[in-house]
Image (cartoon, rainbow, N blue to C red):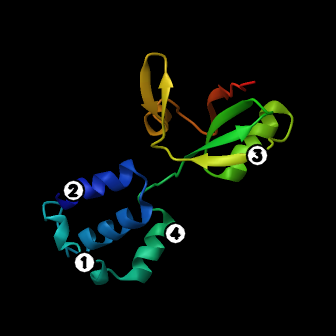
Amino acid sequence: MIVKDLYMDCFRYEESSLAHCIYHLLTEKKISLDDDMSKIDLEQAVHQKVRELIQNNVLGFHKVGIYSLKMNQKDFVFIFASSKQEAIHFYTKTFHQNPLNCHEYSLDYQLARGNDVISFRDMRKEFESVPAIAGYFKRVVSK
């Protein structure tokens, strides 16, 4: 794999720290986009500069997660949000009650939608802004 592919994967999978580190090494001309990724030596990075790049978010990362909030014993709502706190706040504002719990799921978790399967990562592309409701789940209770 070349550096360019790894760098693009950092954006796809929201790996902010690694992306900023690669960006730093690229700007310092210690690697190029066409190098094999084995040429990346993280020890060559000036870690204070990388920290500043991350703090200033020069690459424009906006982390979004998917959270399952329990409405009652059977019903759950999935909410895209930038943090657990934002998901809970959005839930409370939308449903005028507190959720029973809130758990973060992996964006790579796949679920059935109609006759197809979709990951939360792919589903997130359908939303222009967050927080947003991704969908609902009803647990079937067996007797």
Q: Which residue is mark 1?
A: 41
Query: In front of the other: label 3 or label 4?
Result: 3
Q: Which residue is located at x 25 percent, y 75 percent?
A: 28
Q: Nearer the viewer, residue 29 or 133?
A: 133
Instruction: Name the quarter where the N terminus is drawn.
Output: bottom left
Q: Which mark is residue 4?
A: 2
Q: Are marks 1 and 4 in contact (CB under 8 Å)?
A: no
Q: Residues within 10 Å of mark 2 (few under 14, many from 20)?
A: some
Q: Which residue is mark 4?
A: 55
Q: Which mark is residue 57?
A: none
Q: Amino acid at mark 3?
A: Asn
Q: Residues within 10 Å of mark 1 (few under 14, many from 20)?
A: few
Q: Residues within 10 Å of mark 4 (few under 14, many from 20)?
A: few
Q: Which residue is located at x 45 percent, y 43 percent?
A: 108
Instruction: Name the quarter where the C terminus is drawn.
Output: top right
Callout 3: helix, strand or loop?
Answer: loop
Task: Decide which of tag 1 and tag 2 comes sooner along the chain.
Answer: 2
* Image vertical order of residue 67 relative to residue 118, above or below: below
Q: CA distance from mark 3 to mark 4?
A: 31 Å
